[in-house]
Image (tube, rainbow, N blue to C red):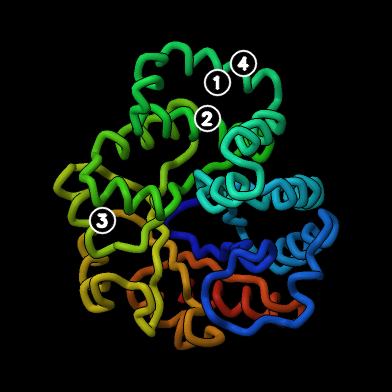
């Protein structure tokens, strides 16, 4: 991904039941996407329509579907959002902490498990002390092992972790993340946040350059904190490329939505899948308007 080329990125919240925004969806939505093939069909249609990438959490059914689609559309990129906080909470609720950990380990290839085990052993003292940054570093390894076959070029830190680290002024975690993505995984580091107005000034204060930031950015100002006006003003002074999220917060995005992003030099946006009929039209509209 480059900061200059318009990008349409497909989100996966609707396909997995993680959608948080109150908006109606087809009555059969939950039941429709139960198998890998059903999800892969959406990714196939998206790639054929011109979608550039899929941004997703570490979810088995999604990754299996993406691997199928990549056999047909190898240019489709995958942007992991790590760690899958929602997934860990859900599995811990269903299976307990030990059961959730066992399930994650069973999903990993033996060679990846061995490598992570060795790195964990080298940091045993910090692990035993439950050092947050050390544990997060190991978690990055666990999460990205699942994405290895998809060769991600951009990895996004989950907004709950970004904003937690931001709240505690945890600069070392951001430095660890940037270093790990570039040296260990040969990917560009990105941050997802719901607090753009506080994140950008702090990154500037810390002299940290983050090439990509995923954040709510939309004409209605939904989740643009502390305010839409302040977030808009900050964009003029940042070198980070913004990926607009929640563009469909209030209603179906229109040309005005994409023109709004273009005016603020936003060249990438996440869209969600709602129905087959409108997907190709929306992708074309987004690319046309953001490229103008």
The answer to whether marks 4 and 3 mark residues whose Cβ atoms lie closer than 8 Å is no
Residue on which disc 2 sits = 141
Q: Residue at x 83, y 57 (%)?
A: 35
The answer to whether marks 3 and 2 mark residues whose Cβ atoms lie closer than 8 Å is no
**Closest to the observer: 153 or 28?**
28
Helix, strand or loop at disc 3?
helix
The answer to whether marks 4 and 1 mark residues whose Cβ atoms lie closer than 8 Å is yes
Q: Residue at x 34, y 28 (%)?
A: 131
Measured from the top left, where is residue 279 in percent x and y? 69, 76
Residue on which disc 1 sits = 116
Left or right: 16 as drawn, with respect to 203: right
Residue on which disc 4 sits = 114
Sequence-earlier tag: 3 or 2: 2
Measured from the top left, where is residue 137 in percent x and y? 43, 30
Sequence-earlier tag: 4 or 3: 4
Residue on which disc 3 sits = 199
Measured from the top left, where is residue 278 in percent x and y? 70, 82
């Amino acid at each position: 991904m480059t900061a200059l080329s318009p990008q349409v990125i497909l989100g996966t919240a609707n396909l997995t039941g993680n959608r948080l925004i109150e908006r109606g969806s087809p009555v059969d939505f939950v039941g429709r996407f139960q198998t890998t093939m059903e999800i892969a069909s959406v990714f196939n249609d998206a790639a054929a329509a011109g979608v550039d990438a899929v941004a997703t959490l570490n979810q088995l059914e999604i990754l299996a579907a993406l691997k199928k689609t990549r056999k047909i559309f190898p240019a489709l990129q995958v942007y992991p959002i790590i760690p899958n906080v929602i997934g860990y909470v859900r599995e811990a609720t269903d299976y307990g902490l030990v059961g959730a950990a066992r399930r994650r380990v069973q999903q990993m290839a033996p060679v990846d498990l061995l490598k992570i085990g060795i790195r964990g052993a080298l940091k045993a003292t910090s692990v035993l002390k439950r050092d947050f940054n050390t544990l997060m570093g190991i978690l990055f390894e666990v999460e990205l092992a699942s994405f290895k076959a998809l060769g991600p070029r951009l990895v996004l830190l989950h907004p709950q972790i970004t904003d937690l680290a931001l709240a505690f002024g945890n600069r070392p975690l951001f430095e660890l993340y940037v270093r790990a993505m570039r040296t260990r995984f040969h990917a560009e580091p990105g941050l997802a946040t719901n607090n753009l107005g506080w994140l950008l000034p702090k990154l500037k204060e810390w002299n940290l350059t983050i090439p990509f930031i995923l954040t709510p950015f939309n004409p209605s100002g939904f989740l643009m904190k502390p305010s839409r006006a302040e977030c808009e003003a900050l964009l003029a002074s940042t070198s980070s490329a913004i990926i607009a999220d929640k563009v469909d917060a209030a209603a179906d995005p229109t040309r005005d939505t994409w023109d709004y992003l273009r005016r603020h030099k936003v060249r990438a946006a996440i869209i969600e899948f709602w129905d087959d009929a409108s997907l190709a039209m929306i992708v074309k509209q987004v690319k046309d308007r953001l490229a103008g």
